[in-house]
């Protein structure tokens, strides 16, 4: 199996008027294709900031201070925002813990997944809807065709 994700000595700090908060301090791990990795820890220990760092969506005043993040051999800390957006939309995603703050309550779950697929995979509405249901099936959501029509 080949290397999928390699995080080396990642440091993400928040620079505030009260000082520097070291949210992620010297984190390293590897994930090979087919492997799973769980980040487990207390609330506020840096799990989400680690994931947000990988996809380069750290909120201000946070900043990746040092480290390397390789995805399929490409250093995500050194690529353009356009290239990162392409990777983020097609190869890497983050599923946030609280669907009420992550998903729009006005649209169904299926519509929101299909919209991302239409934007990044150039699918028509029907293809995107079917792909959204299939994606929900792949992650073992019960009755995905029905759940796709549900609101968050």
Image (cartoon, helix red, strand yellow):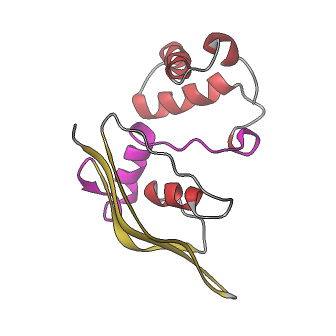
Whether 91 is among the magenta residues is yes
Counting from the top left corner in percent of width and height, residue 102 is at 68, 43
For residue 101, what is the image quadrant? top right
Q: Where the N terminus falls, by quadrant?
A: top left
Counting from the top left corner in percent of width and height, residue 80 is at 34, 60
**Image point (57%, 52%), residue name:** 40
Q: Nearer the viewer, residue 30 or 97?
A: 30
**Image point (43%, 45%), residue name:** 88
**In this rendering, is residue 143 above or below 75?**
above
Q: Nearer the viewer, residue 59 or 121?
A: 59
**In this rendering, is residue 119 above or below 126?**
below
Magenta span of residues: 72-101
Report the label total.
0
**Image point (71%, 25%), residue name:** 108
Counting from the top left corner in percent of width and height, residue 98 is at 72, 43
Q: Is residue 136 left or right of residue 146?
A: left
Q: Is residue 69 left or right of residue 118?
A: left
Q: Residue furthest front?
A: 41
Q: Nearer the viewer, residue 38 or 128?
A: 38
Q: Where the C terminus falls, by quadrant?
A: top right
Whether 81 is among the magenta residues is yes
């Amino acid at each position: 199996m080949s290397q999928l994700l390699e995080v080396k000595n990642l440091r993400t700090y928040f620079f505030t008027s009260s000082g520097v908060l070291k949210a992620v301090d010297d984190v390293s791990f590897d994930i090979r294709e087919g492997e799973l990795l769980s980040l487990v820890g207390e609330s506020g220990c840096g799990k989400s900031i680690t994931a947000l760092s990988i996809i380069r969506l750290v909120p201000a005043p946070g900043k990746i201070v040092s480290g390397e993040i390789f995805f399929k051999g490409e250093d995500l800390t050194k690529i353009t925002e356009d290239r990162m957006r392409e990777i983020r939309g097609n190869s890497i995603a983050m599923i946030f813990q609280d669907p009420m703050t992550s998903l729009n309550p006005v649209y169904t779950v299926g519509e929101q997944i299909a919209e991302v697929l239409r934007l990044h995979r150039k699918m028509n509405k029907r293809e995107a809807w079917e792909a959204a249901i299939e994606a929900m099936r792949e992650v073992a959501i019960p009755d995905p065709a029905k759940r796709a029509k549900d609101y968050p």
